[in-house]
Image (cartoon, coloured by chain):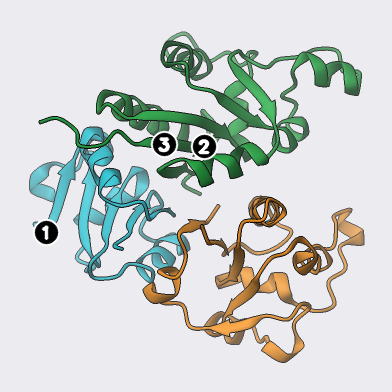
Amino acid sequence: MTALVVIDRAPYGDWRGREAVDMGFSLAAFDQPVSFLFTGPGVNWLRMGQDATELSQKNLARQLGAAAIFGVEALLVDHKALAAYQLSVDTLSSPAQPVTVSPGLYGQYDHILCL
Amino acid sequence: MPSLHIVNKAPDHARFQTCLAAVADEDTLLLTENAVLAAVMAQGLPGTVFALSADLEARGLAPADIMANIGRIDFAGFVSLTEATSRIISW
Amino acid sequence: MPKTTALSFTLIITGAPYVSQAPQTALEFARAVIAAGHRIDRVFLYGDAVHLASTLACAPSDEPQWTQIWSEFLETHRVPAIVCIASALRRGVLDEKEQKRYQRPAHNLEPPFEIAGLGEWVEGTVSSDRTLYFHPTD
């Protein structure tokens, strides 16, 4: 089973993206192949320079930085959404692969999770 | 393998568009909960489209109100759709 | 017409009762799964859906008591139901063991729900023929 966790929620304002990441890391921890796709406002998870100290929240970019340690196969990022939020693939907090979102992309995975 | 896409968000929710962008021509799209409101809109929907009858009825959408190419199904029909494919995406 | 193959299902609910339709849509689907001759391997409550397992929820008498209704369904069909521990502890849904561990004044987990980790969800998605999620609409 190959899984894709879709993160289309902005970071910090609610817990949905965070809970999706927890699920993705669990799949990886149990040796299931999993990749993440950041799209829409979700691409802001990958923005450099995050500091949530004043919010008393964990730094989500740093949390995502553990993806490789957990064994997450790839971080994919919707290139259109990157452009919309003035982000560049060269300056993200974690290395991510730009992709064009299409039915064919989703078709490469057996299990798709979008919280 | 064709996918079954199940969407429950209202048509103007960003997730609804995310879902539509993932539907291939050979896929099936099932509208549930708030998403059944899309059944009266002129917006073309991709794939083979069904809407859950309990959610249509609750929202006052009579069979005459919904677009001709959208099928009405009950929960037994919903289960039948899930029998047809193991690739099921809940948006 | 007889079914060619009975399938196994894992159902994950992520929307809370009285906040979203998720628990009731999931229940109607679950009933239809059983009626069609299939099996439900497990139900997994994640995120806000853990409130469905709170035995302390009291809806007005003219509204469905979703916790009791779900509990009866699970008991009748012997379906294991897991509440994600990380979601549950944060939202104050505890069994007796967690009550003692965290020294809280009460526990409120409705049987037959049990508290466990995300490993149960991974196991379900890997081993069941079908996996479906029931999310909130927001």
Q: Which residue is mark 1?
A: B69
Per the image, label 3 sits on a secondary structure element best described as: strand
Q: Please identify the residue farthest to the top as the structure is shown.
A: C61
Examine the rendering and report whether any part of residue C14 can be seen. Answer: no
Q: Position of residue C52 (x, y in %)?
A: 57, 25
**Viewer-closest of A30 and B73:** A30
Single out the mark in the foreground, 3 or 2. 3
> On the rendered structure, is C101 left or right of A105?
right
Q: Residues within 10 Å of mark 3 (few under 14, many from 20)?
A: many
Residues at circles 3 and 2 in contact by the CB criterion of under 8 Å? no
Q: What residue is at 92 percent from the left and 60 percent from the top?
A: A53
Per the image, label 1 sits on a secondary structure element best described as: loop
In three-dimensional space, the C-alpha distance between marks 3 and 2, rounded to whole angstroms, equals 13 Å
Kindly identify which numbered label has been placed on residue C9: 3
**Viewer-closest of A21 and C128:** C128
> On the rendered structure, is C24 left or right of B36?
right
In three-dimensional space, the C-alpha distance between marks 3 and 1, rounded to whole angstroms, equals 29 Å
Q: Give, as a three-letter code, the residue at label 3.
A: Phe
Query: What colour denotes chain A?
Result: orange
Write down which chain is painted green: C
Examine the rendering and report whether any part of residue B83 can be seen. Answer: yes
Q: Give, as a three-letter code, the residue at label 1.
A: Asn
